[in-house]
Image (cartoon, rainbow, N blue to C red):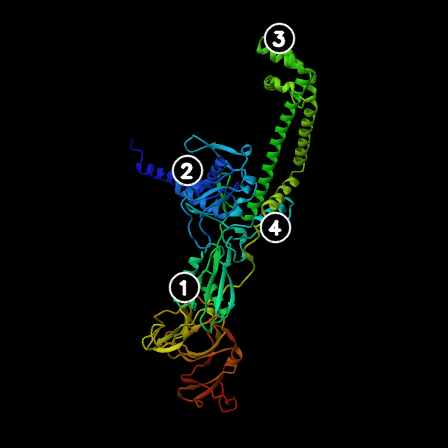
Amino acid sequence: MSKEEKPEATLRDMYSDYFLDYASYVILERAVPHVGDGLKPVQRRILHSLNEMDDGRYNKVANVVGNTMKYHPHGDASIGAAMVWMGQKDILIDTQGNWGNVLTGDSAAAPRYIEARLTPLANAITFNPKTTDWTSSYDGRNKEPVSLPMKFPLLLAQGVEGIAVGLACKILPHNFIELVDACIAVLRKQTFELVPDFPTGGMMDASLYNDGIRGGKVRVRAKIDIVNKKLLRITEVPFGVTTGSLMDNIVNANEKGKIKIQKIEDNTAAVADILVHLPVGSDPEMSRDALFGFTDCEVGISPNSCVIVDGKPLFMGVTEILKHNAFITKDLLQLELEIKLRELRDKWHFSSLEQIFIENRIYRDIEECETWEAVIKAIDDGLEPHKKKLLREVTEEDIVRLTEIKIKRISKFDSFKANEFIKGIEDQIEEVEKNLNNLTRYTIKYFNDLKKKFGKGRERKTEIGTFEKVDRTQVVMANEILYIDRKSGFAGWGLKKEEPIEKCSDIDDMVVFSTDGKLTVSRVSEKSFVGKRPQHIAIFRKDEEKVYSMIYRDGRDGPLYAKRFKIGGITRDKEYDLTKGTKGTRIMYFIIHDNEEESEANAVVVHLKPALRLRNLARLFLFSEIALKGRAAKGNIVTKHGVDRVVRAPKDLNDESGFSLE
């Protein structure tokens, strides 16, 4: 190694290269699906194996897994898990045995006990060796498809989820019939809209779906029926939630006091059926909202549509994915028609050659030929007068095939049947050419046939709607009491022996006004420091538009200020100064009103300290004289004289009682 070379740099470069290679491999070969067929490599290899083994009967999953290992080098566990996932989608794999339950979360039986085969839909949309690009398997012993010729937007039908190095993919499942209709709309240049459809049903608000792109969100709720005042029944659960996990979640929320239930039963079998028994006196509507607010009866799902396009990961919305798949289907159908047309023309060509060869008894011209070259030339010379009737030139391969015709076939040749056979081929050629000339119409017919043949039983399961997010503070059980120890400055629900303030829950916020004019809103806890002898403490409720009236002295000897304000928007645990912030500031008067009118009727008497030439020591102040402003306003000056105290004025007091404003 020369002095100029640096081993550290070499190792760094090696590490960087290896990491990038590994990251690229995980993204392209394991975690993210291909936009064309909508499959990850393991899924594609499973389908290829099923097709390779297909004889119409069920195969043991263990055998399918073993066969797939010829193509997938990552072991049987990953193959078996991927196959169970695909089987539970009920789209491409026809299952037999215990394949688990997506409702209860029960796992599938071992691969040796369950069986599978391809569905008729899979055979209709997935395979065609003539239009498939092939590559060598990892050990070079076999050929596997680069991408299956999928003539349907499978990716959007079954959805997918995967995590790679620095990249995640989550595409939600959509409805089969709606996908077919959307493909037809694309071909007709019409608008369409796609939203998810989940196999577990439920209710969905997809107003923020954002076409499945990162940043969007779907809210899904369980279907909860009110049977009577004491009983709720859950018949559908949100996507990704099992009945077992949901029951545990509900029990946990009950133990924490978020909701109140008497007992819960799970009778789930083919469909979800969870009975939630309520205590006597419960409000079923409120209890249902509490389930949405505090349990997995409502979940938010954030999609992240990422696919492999031209060997690179690309974020693409579901609308663009569907358009891409619709045109891929059109291109594949065109390719199939072109292949079929070529085969039909070859078939017509050789059938016509055979008819000419037999009817004109050209086979007799080779009886005296002594060499193979002479045989070929004799047949070619015999065909020469008829070549202008053919669609293409006669090749040596065509002549060789003519020599392979058996004598028995020649002896039983029927010219009428031969003409009818050729006429049938011509009719097929005409039909294929017609379909090629009207490719869009042909593709639309293909999609309509798919819907007619396979759409039954695939109707939408998830109900689409819009619903407001449950305000948890409105439905939470207020099972705690907020206490305060004014002397030490601590507050919380754990101070059972101290001064009670009001009922609360552990998700409520409390608002604290200190004597020096500071405002803080924080979460209620078991015990927290709020400051010694606070001016006011209470549970903070955003929906209550309370008006606060306050008079404070600026500093130790400064003027007296008055203000009327609303708290407005706040940030939790942030301290807000309601005064000018001078050291020694003190609140002299503080009161809370339920509305603005009530605050305007408020009046106080300001008692001044005795001073030279100061005759009137008690002065009336009306809060109606100042405007209602935000909390940041510093207020209006009431007086610059020294103030002894401020007290609320009697209700029958008015401006003519001998008091005057300065």
Badge 3 is on which residue? 368
Query: Which x, y percent locates residue 287?
Result: 47, 68
Badge 2 is on which residue? 66
From mark 2 to mark 1, how far is it between C-alphas?
43 Å
Given the image, on which type of amino acid does mark 4 rest? Phe
Q: Which mark is in front, 4 or 2?
A: 2
Q: Is residue 650 left or right of residue 500?
A: right
From mark 2 to mark 3, how far is it between C-alphas?
59 Å
Q: Which mark is in front, 4 or 1?
A: 1
Choose top left, top right, bottom left or bottom right for residue 428: top right
Query: Which x, y percent locates residue 41?
Result: 46, 40
Q: Residues within 10 Å of mark 4 (few under 14, many from 20)?
A: some
Query: Which x, y percent locates residue 299?
Result: 47, 58
Query: Which x, y percent locates residue 281?
Result: 47, 74
Badge 1 is on which residue? 251
Given the image, on which type of amino acid does mark 2 rest? Gly
- Please say if the residues under marks 2 and 1 sit with CB atoms less than 8 Å apart: no
